Image: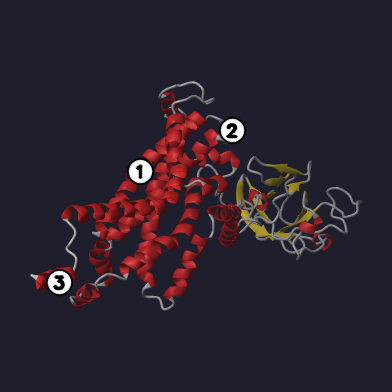
């Protein structure tokens, strides 16, 4: 009797009853939940203060008038779709949603495929991704300057003007005009001599409106040219600046200090038809040879006085939205390229090599293998860009000048303009915010589900 008793006293303690173990497990779970809530509490408070509360407040505010004191029900939503500016904002937002994500996804795909074949791929990716480090405000200022209509400020118009002038040329005397009483101005801006001349005679064509500092560098005095006599069958003349620096001189007469106008196009006109053309020399002289007998008018075509080409109105009502989308592409192309490039690096190389061994060319591999395998990545990139595009505000507000702000407005800028930018109707602005939320939520839900499916 003694031995078993001693063994029992010295052995291990008996296990706790099942009910006690379950209670302990429940206490541990509750403690774990409490710890998790405490860790998540700061984030939940921020989420509630910065997201949930503003959303609920905006929904409630959208049912009140501009002062916020009178309940108007759905009047703000009805007014939203009657306002031409809001309808234009919805139209522009639709253009953004269709054009920007499509172009970005396509550019990102093409660049990601091409970068794989570039030796300095990392440096190239870094270069394209750098605009992502620039804030939208700074990017807007950069492109506002780049799109400036003055070719001396806007780099795009400077390039457009240089290209135009290289092929089309430009008038040398856009401010010149004929001396009144001696020349007749046509409806097209050309000038014609009042008196007719015949072969063997000479004619002086006086012009004004050109500053001495604007004369071409090769301009020479016109007096020697005015003194030359025409040979038989020739019609000679001189186009000159009828202005003497410092004063003096006589109108309509070539004086000693007056300069010729080189590079001026001159035509001999008979019976309303141009029979000969010439270009003035450095001293303003010109000569028509082998003319038939008769009387002629000397004409300076309007092309001599055409205003210089000033480039493209990038920020005009017609092109302002495409111009802003171009700035958006500059910022986000690197983002799309890097994400698609990451997906491209995971493709099975054996499938690509097998296709090459079967005789497929690079275009067939790209169209039939690369794009289908990248479809999930392309979809995620496209939907992410759609969500981002719907919220675009900074670029539109900074780049679009005041007179065309309404032509470029999107839902985000229209919401701000209606609420704080002069409209002072926060009821209507809240309704626009709710509309924007309704449009963004489906894309967000689609993206979240896509991520969950990819994780599973």
Tell me the element at label 2: loop
Q: Residue at x 71, y 53 (%)?
A: 173
Q: Quadrant of the C terminus?
A: bottom left
Rendered view: 271 above or below 62: below
- N-terminal of the two: label 1 or label 3? 3
Q: Would residue 100 be seen by someone viewing this image from the given angle?
A: no
Q: Tell me, for residue 6, which label it has, or none.
A: 3
* Horizontal and vertical percent position of residue 419: 53, 34
Q: How many neighbours does mark 2 have within 10 angstroms: few (below 14), some (14-19), or many (20 or more)?
A: few
Quote the CA–CA distance across marks 2 and 1. 29 Å
Disc 2 vs disc 1: which is toward the camera? 1
Asked whether, in this view, residue 382 is left or right of residue 174, the answer is: left
Residue topped by disc 2? 422
Where residue 283 sits in the image (x, y, percent)? Answer: 77, 62
In the picture of the structure, the residue carrying the numbered disc 1 is: 441
Q: Position of residue 448 (x, y in %)?
A: 31, 51
394 lies above or below 424: below
Q: Mark 3 vs mark 2: give the one in front.
A: 3
Counting residues from the start of the chain, the first of labels 3 and 2 encountered is 3
Q: Quadrant of residue 78?
A: top left
Residue ID at (47%, 42%): 49
For numbered disc 1, what is the local secondary structure?
A: helix
User: Does residue 71 appear in this view?
Assistant: yes
Residue 249 or residue 306, whichever sits in front: 306
């Amino acid at each position: 009797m003694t031995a078993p008793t001693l063994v029992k006293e010295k052995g291990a303690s008996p296990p706790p009853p099942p009910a006690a173990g379950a209670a302990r497990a429940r206490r541990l779970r509750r403690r774990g939940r409490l710890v998790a809530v405490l860790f998540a509490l700061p984030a939940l408070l921020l989420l509630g203060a910065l997201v949930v509360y503003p959303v609920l407040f905006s929904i409630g505010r959208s049912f009140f008038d501009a002062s916020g004191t009178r309940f108007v029900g759905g009047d703000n939503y009805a007014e939203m779709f009657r306002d031409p500016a809001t309808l234009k904002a919805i139209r522009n937002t639709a253009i953004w949603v269709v054009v920007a994500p499509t172009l970005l996804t396509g550019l990102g795909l093409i660049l990601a495929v091409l970068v794989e074949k570039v030796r300095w791929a990392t440096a190239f990716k870094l270069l394209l991704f750098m605009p992502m480090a620039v804030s939208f405000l700074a990017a807007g200022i950069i492109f506002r300057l780049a799109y400036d209509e003055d070719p001396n400020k806007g780099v795009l118009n400077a390039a457009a003007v240089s290209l135009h002038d290289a092929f089309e040329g430009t008038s040398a005397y856009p401010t010149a005009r004929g001396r009144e009483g001696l020349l007749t101005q046509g409806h097209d801006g050309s000038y014609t001599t009042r008196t007719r001349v015949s072969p063997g005679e000479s004619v002086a064509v006086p012009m004004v409106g050109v500053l001495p500092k604007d004369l071409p560098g090769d301009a020479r005095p016109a007096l020697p040219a005015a003194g030359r006599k025409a040979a038989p069958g020739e019609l000679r003349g001189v186009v000159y600046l009828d202005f003497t620096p410092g004063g003096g001189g006589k109108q309509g007469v070539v004086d000693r200090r007056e300069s010729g106008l080189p590079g001026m196009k001159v035509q001999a006109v008979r019976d309303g038809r141009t029979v000969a053309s010439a270009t003035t020399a450095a001293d303003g002289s010109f000569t028509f040879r082998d003319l038939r007998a008769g009387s002629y008018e000397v004409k300076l075509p309007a092309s001599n006085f055409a205003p210089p080409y000033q480039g493209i109105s990038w920020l005009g009502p017609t092109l302002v939205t495409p111009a802003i989308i171009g700035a958006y592409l500059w910022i986000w192309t690197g983002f799309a390229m890097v994400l698609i490039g990451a997906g491209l690096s995971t493709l099975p190389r054996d499938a690509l090599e097998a296709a090459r061994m079967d005789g497929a060319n690079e275009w067939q591999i790209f169209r039939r293998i690369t794009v289908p395998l990248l479809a999930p990545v392309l979809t995620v990139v496209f939907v992410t860009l759609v969500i981002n595009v719907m919220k675009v505000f900074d670029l539109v507000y900074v780049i679009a000048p005041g007179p065309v702000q309404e032509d470029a407005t999107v839902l985000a800028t229209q919401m701000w303009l209606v609420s704080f930018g002069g409209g002072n109707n926060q009821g209507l602005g809240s309704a626009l915010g709710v509309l924007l939320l309704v449009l963004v939520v489906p894309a967000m839900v689609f993206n979240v589900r896509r991520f969950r499916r990819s994780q599973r």
